[in-house]
Amino acid sequence: MFAKKFKLSDKGQEASYAVAEIVARKMKSHTIAETVISPACQEIVRVMFGEDAVSELNKIPLSDNTIRRRIQDTSGDIECNIKSKILKHKLFALQVDESTDITGKAQLLVFVRFINDEAIVEDFLCCKELPETRKGQDVFDVFNSYLEYCGSNWKNCVGICTDGAPAMTGCLKGFVPIAQKQNPNTIHTHCFIHREALVAKTLGPELKSALNMVVKIVNHIKTRPLKCRQFAKLCVGMETGHSTLIQHTEIRLLSREKVLSRFYELREVIDLLFARKPERLCRMFE
């Protein structure tokens, strides 16, 4: 009898970890497992297999605190595996980025590359909150503490990839120069995504004017609720597959491509929308 209970408990623990992984991957609230997933599963099992099967589902721990612990356990296990592989193979390269989250806090994101079983492996390494200031020394201090915690050192770092922010690449006080003082052989490369953004800033006058025109038209539609509703209705009637335009922003580095692609896909709808009152479009470019 005890062996059977232990076996069921094992299955319940495994199911609990599986649900926690789904919640983490979907970035949902931890309470969703107990308030939504569990009741939904119980109803499905009750209809398909009867009440006896439902009692087995009740043995699966899915409280918010349990889900939080499961996610922490899984995250810690992944981190431990990555650290052990880095220590085993020693040499590694980093991709470092600093960004601000929705609460206004500065976060340091670090990805790592290393060779494992004759293959180059890339994985997420850590996310650390930066202090009040976001200078190069702050970035270095935060990650250096984590590197010491992992048991590694800068001598094993062969490369660093960053954007062109002063905190990262400043000649004297940037993160990269400070790191290179620890290991002069560390190579610095510029993130290829940011290279595209930098090239876009040096567009020729014709391409620049075309982009500005697209941005003006998109903003004209997006900032007027009536226009948005009319535009969405036209999109539905013409079966375009989209019902809204994407607004351009300088913050998101790859937004230009998405803005222009969506604008081109919906060009016929835009033409029809302004064909009703072409004088408004003319006033936009006076």
Image (tube, grey):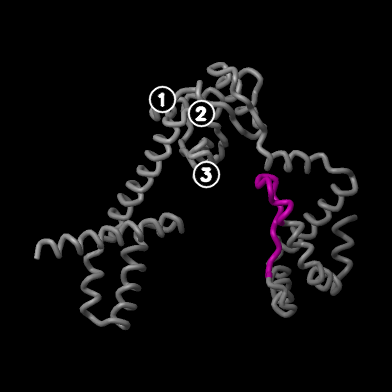
Mark 2, residue position: 91
Q: Which quadrant of the rendered structure holds the C terminus?
A: bottom right
Residue type, label 1: Glu
Q: Nearer the viewer, residue 232 or 153?
A: 153
Q: Nearer the viewer, residue 30 or 95?
A: 95
Q: Quadrant of residue 36?
A: bottom left
Numbered mark located on residue 101 in the image: 3
Q: Which residues are magenta?
A: 242-258
Q: Report how far apart the C-alphas of labels 1 and 2 lie in the structure.
A: 15 Å
Which sits earlier in the primary sequence, circle 2 or circle 3?
2
Q: Position of residue 42 (x, y in %)?
A: 30, 74
Counting other residues with Cα less than 10 Å from the Cα at mark 3, is it few (<14), some (14-19), or many (20 or more)?
few
Residue lying at 48% horizontally and 32% vertically, measured from the top left: 130
Q: Is residue 25 magenta?
A: no
Marks 1 & 3, CB-CB < 8 Å contact: no
Marks 1 & 2, CB-CB < 8 Å contact: no
Direction from residue 173 to residue 145 in the image, left or right: left
Give the foreground label among 2 and 3: 2
Marks 2 & 3, CB-CB < 8 Å contact: no
Q: Is residue 255 visible?
A: yes
Q: Which quadrant of the rendered structure holds the N terminus?
A: bottom left
Q: Is residue 205 above or below residue 232?
A: above
Name the magenta segment's main secondary structure. Answer: loop
Which sits earlier in the primary sequence, circle 1 or circle 2?
2
Q: Is residue 253 magenta?
A: yes
Q: Residue furthest front?
A: 118
Direction from residue 68 to residue 121 in the image, left or right: right
Residue lying at 54% horizontally and 41% vertically, measured from the top left: 119
Numbered mark located on residue 148 in the image: 1
Which sits earlier in the primary sequence, circle 1 or circle 3?
3
**Disc 2 element:** loop
